[in-house]
Amino acid sequence: MIEYLDTHYTYVLAFVLLAIGLYMMIANENLVKKVIGVNLFQTAIFLFFVSVAYVEGGDAPIVPAETNPGELLVASPLPHVIVLTAIVVGVALTAVALALIVRIYAEYGTLREDTLREVRADE
């Protein structure tokens, strides 16, 4: 077990970040903290995805013409490209969420979810 943790510590880190992000999304009443939790959750998913795609001793997927492609151990660039795309989507999601939070605060004067529910119920 200890040997596995020494070699796969990024998986453990990813699941710890995932748990912290999930807890922040569920347990906090503050909307900004919920957005921070979503970002931590996304970061954990990115770390896990890149960790799974890692190839020990892998080279860049550039194969010289005189080499047999079956002889080389190459890393696929696809997971990294997908993670880069997901990062861009995550930044856009965060920007929209924070813009909505600013509008909610301007309208209702609070960022607490329970208070917002009470105010909305009174309307």
Image (cartoon, rainbow, N blue to C red):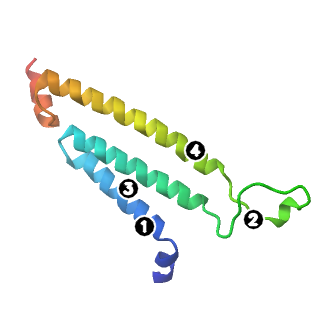
Q: Is disc 2 in contact with disc 3, using a CB cutoff of under 8 Å?
A: no
Give the SS element for disc 4.
helix
- Residue for point 12% across, 31% down: 110
Q: Is disc 4 in contact with disc 3, using a CB cutoff of under 8 Å?
A: no
> Which residue has dot 3 on it?
18
| Distance of label 1 from label 2 (alpha carbons) | 26 Å
Q: Amino acid at mark 3?
A: Leu
Q: Position of residue 108 (x, y in %)?
A: 12, 24
Can you tell which of label 4 and label 3 is closer to the viewer? 4
Q: Is disc 1 in contact with disc 2, using a CB cutoff of under 8 Å?
A: no
Q: N-terminal of the two: label 1 or label 4?
A: 1
* Residue 82, disc: 4
* Residue 12, disc: 1
Callout 4 crowding tier (Cα within 10 Å): few <14, some 14–19, many ≥20: few
- Residue for point 60% across, 45% down: 81
| Distance of label 2 from label 3 (alpha carbons) | 31 Å
Give the SS element for disc 3.
helix
Q: Amino acid at mark 2?
A: Leu
| Distance of label 2 from label 4 (alpha carbons) | 21 Å
| Distance of label 1 from label 4 (alpha carbons) | 22 Å
Q: Is disc 2 in contact with disc 4, using a CB cutoff of under 8 Å?
A: no
Q: N-terminal of the two: label 1 or label 3?
A: 1
Q: Position of residue 24 (x, y in %)?
A: 26, 50
For residue 42, above or below residue 71:
above
In this view, the residue in front, 123 or 76, is: 76
Q: N-terminal of the two: label 1 or label 2?
A: 1
